[in-house]
Image: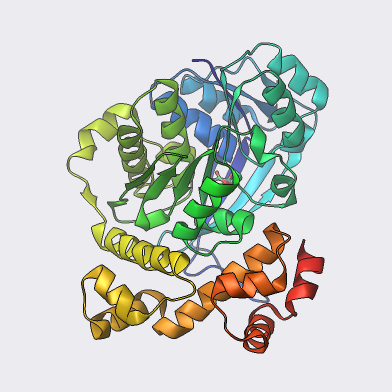
Amino acid sequence: MKILNFGSCNIDFVYSVDHIVRSGETITTNKLETFPGGKGLNQSIAISKAGSNVFHAGCIGTDGKMLKDILQKNGVDISYLKTVEGKNGHAIIQVNKEGSNSIFLYPGSNEMVTKDFIDTVLNNFEKDNIILLQNEISNIDYIVKKAYEKEMCIMLNPSPFNEKITNLDFKMLSYILLNEVEAEEITGCTSSEECIVYFKNTYPHLKVILTLGEKGCIYIDKNSVIRQSAFKVKAVDTTAAGDTFTGYFVSGISKKENIKDILKTASAASAIAVSRNGAAPSIPSKDEVINCIEGLKPNDTNNKSEILLGKIEAYISENFKNASLKDLALKLGYSSVYTGNLIKKLTGKSFSKYLQQKRCQYAAKMLLNTDLSIESIIENAGYENESFFRKIFKEKYGKNPLEYRKEVK
Ligand code: RIB
């Protein structure tokens, strides 16, 4: 299966810092390193390192030769990589002592992807070829439209999230690979369990891969939900961990491997990337992944909590009207006291506060996504008393329900 990745190439300036700089603060950094990066470039390299052929299409600036070189060195086909007049895109990345990062981007050449160039590239691809996209180049809405017309298999990593993503027609996508923050932006759901329900109901044809950092990942399609734990490693730099996962996932899909195996390999590859410095240079080869995978330990603590929380949320969503701590405890097989403590530990809230929060979120979602009357929403959410609902809603969303429906819709 032919794979085209239409994406960004950045020069990454990586600053090691004691902590990520706060607004109004000046700090001195410990080290500056320059790496090839960009979500597009990282993902193309990951696809190639995972053992698949990939064409990288995109624009580099006159100062972007190192990016072309690294793509070529890693076996990526650069026939559709164009050099344009002007500066290459770059990223300013701070990495703190725990390996967490904060990034801002200068788009440069990545914003010079024109409709003419897109047409020229897409002329070389056909039905069922895979096209992978992120959100760091210009005209992604046009690419999605044209690729959909050609009946290509469109895989989107909606990162970084902004209004360009909201404007896309998700019905045109075959796969979406996103993290918790992006998922919340797109669905309005604050938990993975709610996201699962949202995607299954709203886009039943779409295959969704939700990455949850150290809590692992979840694959969702209309018939199945498959979970994979993350692997435990000492985090050095999390930059490109998601890109590594995406590249390995795309490669696995192109080879028609089984989803469980793909998730396991992609998670292991991503864990190895986290244990190394830099973006593209941190991506492991398939051989390295195979050699390490048996020695890696799954991060099950987080996974168990995630599953338990999932069960609690599923119970609440199915029982908005009659949910009770006693009934939930019975379903989980624990005592009420233990269940109450567990909920407090997992959510930071008492059962009744947590139930209120979920009811309110459900009502907000219904206000946005349906034309149901306030009365039926209140009833479905399990509120007996309308004025109580209005009070709670205003406290949480700063508006009364009708204003919210009008302004946010
Ligand atoms: O996902 C990591 C990448 O995001 C970095 O390489 C940086 O260039 C930004 O695009």
Residue 100 is at least partly visible in this image: no
Looking at the image, in which quadrant does ligand 1 appear?
Answer: top right
Specify the quadrant that holds the C terminus.
Answer: bottom right
Residue 367 rendering spot, x and y as whole percentages:
70, 66
Q: Is residue 47 left or right of residue 304?
A: right
Q: Residue at x 36, y 74 (%)?
A: 346
Residue 408 rendering spot, x and y as whole percentages:
76, 65
Q: Residue at x 48, y 52 (%)?
A: 196
Residue 139 rendering spot, x and y as whole percentages:
77, 34
Front residue of 174/363: it is 363
Residue 18 is at least partly visible in this image: yes
Quadrant housing residue 61: top right
Q: Is residue 292 left or right of residue 47?
A: left
Q: Is residue 166 left or right of residue 211?
A: right
Q: Residue at x 30, y 58 (%)?
A: 303
Q: Looking at the image, how many numbered discs can be counted on the residues?
A: 0
Residue 281 rendering spot, x and y as whole percentages:
44, 37
**In this picture, is 272 found above or below 366?**
above
Quadrant housing residue 39: top right
Q: How is the image coloured?
A: rainbow
